[in-house]
Image (spheres, rainbow, N blue to C red):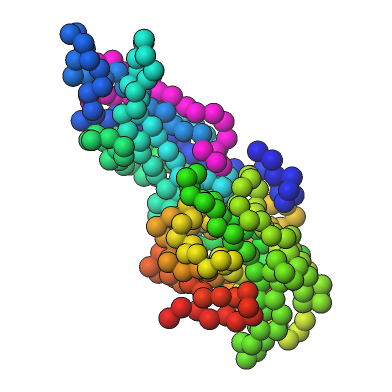
Amino acid sequence: MDFSDDGSKPEFNVATIEVLEARNLVASDIGFFRAGKSDAYVIVKDVKGMVGDDRRTSVVNASLNPTWNQTFHCKFNYKLSAFKFKLMDKDVVTEDDPLGKATVPIDWFLDKLDPANPIVMLDLWLPLAKAKHGELHVRITVQFNIPIALPGIKVPLPMDFQIGLAWDFKKKETPIDLDASIAGLDRGENIYDKVFFGHLVGFNGAVRHSGDDRTGDGDGDDETITFDMSRLPAQVEKIVVTVNSFSGQPLSHMKYAYVRIIDRGRTHAFFGIGKGHVPETDGLLFGAHPDIEMYTFVASMLGCYSLEALCKGLQRVMAGTLSPLQ
């Protein structure tokens, strides 16, 4: 993985993936001796954010209810949106046949995360997509080594830091041109200044934008905003971090998006949201800084997880107005 574009250092969470068994699989084999059976194995897919190649179980011959009980260990970074599994039928003469696929979004682990315990275990029977029937039984234990900014938690900030944002779309979907922006509000919540793709430096040089990324491709952050709090004008009472669709298309087409606070190249705090959690709006409020004197980043945005959440729909911020959806 190349992180050179945003200057970050490699950081990884750890996952233990147990592929246990499957049941009621589709019969893929034909022929007199093997009709009505499948020779099944599971591929743990190498997806964006995961370190290493595909992992594969052994093949269980002639069974529609195979048992593997195999364990895989892997590392992943903040770009991982989901663990993905593909079931296959092993064939000797022809190409292997697909038996279905399953996905475990990283959101499921974030939903269960306890601030006092960075380890989350999920034991799941997953219905197989792209198959008439069948289920896969997996147990996944994730240890979050990269600090997570949970809703309602204030994260102390240094005087100099960066905010990195990134987003991804499904392979078959046309990427939307998204833009990360900063708006600074005064005591009356009027916009004092803003930094975005058309105005890369603001707040008397205290805030600098890395520039526009129109596709969301790559392994590092898509857009990075750098802060020097010692130069921030005294009139600024609040800072909000937003992501907006340039053309006004809904952000619900995103597969995954995240925001992270970076201190000297390391992730100081992180939060991500996946498809299904993103509201039908053309903008997200990813962060607020309600107390400049305390230098804290507050992960208390509204809407994503039906509690104090980490996103809130916005109409537009690019035109200089900040108008949350009601």
Region rendered in magenta: 47-68
Q: Quadrant of the C terminus?
A: bottom left
Placement of 93 over or under 5, stated as above or below? above
In the rendered view of the protein, which quadrant contains the N terminus?
top right
Q: 106 and 296: which one is in front?
A: 106
Q: Nearer the viewer, residue 272 or 91?
A: 91
Q: Residue at 23% across / 28% down in the picture?
A: 26
Taking the spot 36% from the left edge, 10% from the top edge, the residue there is 92
x and y percentages locating residue 178 in the rendered image? 59, 61
Q: Position of residue 46 (x, y in %)?
A: 51, 34
Q: Is residue 150 visible?
A: yes
Viewed as shown, does residue 154 lie left or right of 211? left
Q: Main secondary structure of the magenta part?
A: loop
Q: Quadrant of residue 237?
A: bottom right
User: Looking at the image, how many numbered discs can be counted on the residues?
Assistant: 0
Q: Is residue 49 left or right of residue 102?
A: right
Q: Quadrant of residue 147?
A: bottom right
The image quadrant that residue 121 belongs to is: top left
Q: Where is 307 relative to 66, above or below?
A: below
Furthest residue toward bottom? 188
Q: Is residue 158 at all visible to an observer of this figure?
A: no
* Residue occupying image coordinates x 65% and y 76%: 183
Q: Is residue 241 left or right of residue 22?
A: right
Residue 114 magenta-highlighted: no
**Most foreground residue, 83 or 34:** 34
- Give x and y (percent) for residue 203: 77, 77
Q: Is residue 55 magenta?
A: yes
Going 72% across and 51% down the picture, which residue do you hit? 6
